[in-house]
Amino acid sequence: MAAADKFRVADALVNLESIPEGKLVDFITGKLVNDTPEEYVRQNIARSLVLEYGYDPKQIEVEFPIKQGSKRVRVDLAVFPMDAKHDQDTAFIIVETKKNGTNPEDKREGIEQLKSYMAACLNCEYGMWTNGEFRACFRRAFDGKVFRNDEAIDIPAMGNKRVDAPTRDVLRAATGDNLLFAFRRCHNYIAGNQGLQKPEAFWELLKLIFCKIEDERSSNESLQFYVSESERTTMNGQSRVKNRLQRVFAELVVNKYPTIFKTNDEIEMNPRVLAYVVSELQHYSLLNSPVDVKGVAYEEVVGSNLRGDRGEFFTPRNACQMAVKMLDPQPNERVLDPAMGTGGFLVTAMNHVLRVIEEAEQEKWADISKPTRFELEELYHKRNDYLSKRVFGLDLNPNLVRAAKMNMVMNNDGSGNLFQCNSLENPHRWSADVRANLSLGSIDVLFTNPPFGSKIVIDDPLILEQYDVACQWVQTSDNWEIRLDRDGNRLFQPSMPPEILFVERCLQFLKPGTGRMAIVIPNGLLNNPGLAYFRYWLLQKAQIIAIVDMHRDLFQPGNDTQTSMVLLRRKAPGESSKDYPVFMAIADSIGHDKRGNTIYMRGPDGSLILRQQRVTQIRIVNGVRQGQELTVQTKIVDDELDDVANAYLEWLKTAASGQRQVSRIS
């Protein structure tokens, strides 16, 4: 799809405005500013001040000039009381943002710079310094003799004078990359101050994330996941926090998730480190934060710690969303990923179906704005029934199984049917739990990105003997046949790459005639001359519904294997072979480059394209949550995968009517 075509399509759908390369629109002022690493951090904080902390953009000044001694300097962000005059003496929050990597101890660019700016503003009460990866907050207090800058947990939200133990009504949903930054800060702090390697630090962080989620879910009147300012700075206070969180972990987490945590598991962090992590996360609502925000934050931290050496490259979220949208799983269908990794496909499919359930139930409600208790109970019953009976996942790596369960818990649960298992083994060798829940031929919809690569091969004869594709094949005049020995027994290859075996195992999992799947495979399976027998076999066993040629940067950084997303339906026994239409697409853009940097849409002249979005700002006024709609301008990620899914759904209408058509996006 050419850039000019993209521009015309987008322009017809949303209000757009183009900006020059190297520029972006400031979230507060709407003016063009240079797109720099420091500006990236500032824009995240600016959005957070409005969308998380609840301040009106009119209360915020960017690059606000103040007088410091005989010179004038500019404050990155200054916040003023509502309706107050914006001058140096009325600013009550000052924020200094720096590019990632800036040393907080630097005399000129670090925390001391923030403190000097706070001292120059007569009524400044709070300050924040951050480079994205590190954040420090301070409260300016007067002890009767001099002003001092006490370390604070956070700056206050709109209408809150003091930051201390949060109540449920002030928990805020995370926006942008701020939860990702918080997870990184916590992970790095644990690794740097607890004496743990980063993978071990990751598991300790996940214990606290579980505590946070279950504390939000609990029916207790007061929250337990918090640290007050006095507790944060004293040894006794830090010990109280650890004791409080150990109880939460033992009572609300370990007892509820015995397949994730052992009975004797405890939080291993020392009190000081634990208090820091709690202070970074306590004001967020993990339950109410958008699924994409949580997913990006979680998967980034997981990927940096659990990426293995067995060809495990986790499927990007947009690829998962494309596949799920195309196959459209329904509430009565069983979903499986037999190589689930951290659960990206399953989380996406689960949330897709939960939306279907919610929309169907809401259509029955007398008043959608005021559902009755019975209506809500019916919705929860159907949600829980789906989560407990329809979502399944398998993976060979026990650490990935554990991480996938945690991912599911963060995203509406559904973690009960995830198992550690070698999907390629004979089902008779699976554990009793797996056999009780799964059998070949029982799955309606399957999504997977199996491990692949030249470094891993399967050579166990007990595994290979289950698969047609592991046999030796010979070409006849018009087809392929399995090679037999003199006694009529099938001859097998000595070893096989796992991705070929996974294609057959996935088809075996599907219900004959109706089961369908989306699988990521290396393009060699589709075009390598030496695998012609495999393609012959595949056409006998399955209907190819669609092939999407993915950009080679899909799994970058880390792997540049050229892959395709292939949609298949398992044929019924004896089903005749006849011509049928196949949807084909080439995804030229997938939202990021080979370094993992996000790529944004540009117009024909190369300028960035913006769109206007309506977002809801939540603020607390006199203890009451109030919502206010704001119009913001955002860049558009250059990602065609959703366009591919939409084109496929349109193509299905023509395919269903019997018209032969092959669509191509390129």
Image: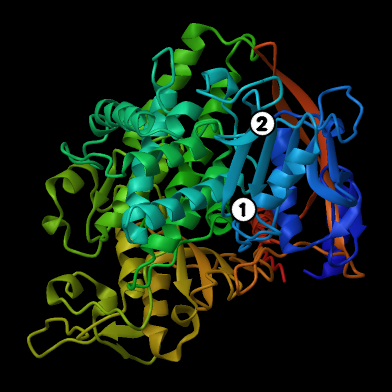
Residue 244: quadrant of the picture? top left
Left or right of 3: which side holds 160?
Answer: left
Between 578 and 211, the residue placed more toward the observer is 211
Q: Vertically, is 226 above or below 182?
A: above
Q: In which image quadrant can residue 553 be found?
A: bottom right
Establish if 229 lies above or below 336: above
From where the camera sits, is residue 657 visible? no
Name the quadrant of the C terminus: bottom right
Question: Which amino acid lies under the numbered mark 2 shown in the image of this protein?
Answer: Val
Label 1 residue SS: loop
Residue at screen point 32% across, 34% down: 389
* Residue wearing tag 1: 132
Left or right of 34? Residue 160 is: left
Figure quadrant of residue 105: bottom right
Image coordinates of residue 155 in percent, x first then y, are 64, 33
Disc 1 or 2, which lies upstream in sequence?
1
Find residue 146 and name its label: 2
